[in-house]
Amino acid sequence: MTIALERPVGTTDPTTLIDPEVMNRLVRRVTTDHPEIDEDTARRIVGQAAAFIATSGTMPGRSLVPSELVDYGWHAFILHTVDYAAFCQKVVGRFVHHVPTDEDEQVQGGAAAARERTVNAIQAAGYTVDAELWHSAADCNQCHAGCHDSPKSG
């Protein structure tokens, strides 16, 4: 069964934010680290990671979180530090940090609320959301408030 998602009018395909050569590198990293993921799905994952980074980087404090699959793309991107730093500067205007947290910290409002908040923010920022990749929030007990860019408060 093939599912084709329609792109909402007036949205940007987030894969266009990433240089094609960098995209290919990141796709290879995702498929190497997660052999169960095919190349097409990895490309979609990296695109959604780009949308997540672009959105969360401009909305610090919103407690946005990637899905489990999108987190694979973000982590692959972070490993390519030169490409990641250049992307952040070009798209967000600053470096988007991945800040670790203590294991006892919880995502604001719970995982489902965080996922919904994130998807809504990405759509509001004008990026296409690939709904198939956003079924569950990442288990980010090692990432501040669920793998996002906001500084710790208090």
Image: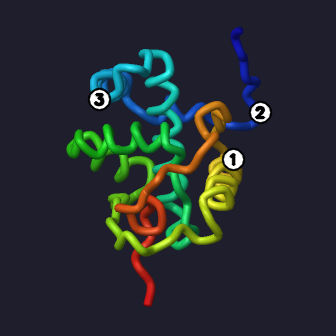
Q: Is residue 33 visible?
A: yes
Q: Which residue is mark 1?
A: 123
Name the residue at 71% across, 9% down: 1
Q: Say above or below: 139 vs 99.
A: above
Q: Nearer the viewer, residue 15 or 29?
A: 29
Judge depth for marks 1 and 3 and give the one in front: 3
Q: Is residue 40 left or right of residue 98?
A: right
Q: Secondary structure at mark 3?
A: helix
- The image's mark for residue 33 is 3
Q: Which residue is mark 2?
A: 8
Residue 52, position as x, y percentages in the image: 52, 48
Residue 150, position as x, y percentages in the image: 45, 70
Q: Is residue 85 left or right of residue 55?
A: left
Q: Are marks 1 and 2 in contact (CB under 8 Å)?
A: yes
Q: Secondary structure at mark 2?
A: loop
- The image's mark for residue 112 is none
Judge depth for marks 2 and 3 and give the one in front: 3
Residue 13, position as x, y percentages in the image: 59, 31
Q: Secondary structure at mark 1?
A: helix
Cα–Cα span, label 1 and label 3: 28 Å
Q: Say above or below: 86 vs 6.
A: below
Name the residue at 64% across, 31% down: 132
Q: Pick whichever of labels 1 and 3 is earlier in the sequence.
A: 3
Q: Nearer the viewer, residue 101 or 125?
A: 101
Cα–Cα span, label 1 and label 2: 9 Å
Cα–Cα span, label 2 and label 3: 31 Å
Q: What amino acid is at disc 2?
A: Pro
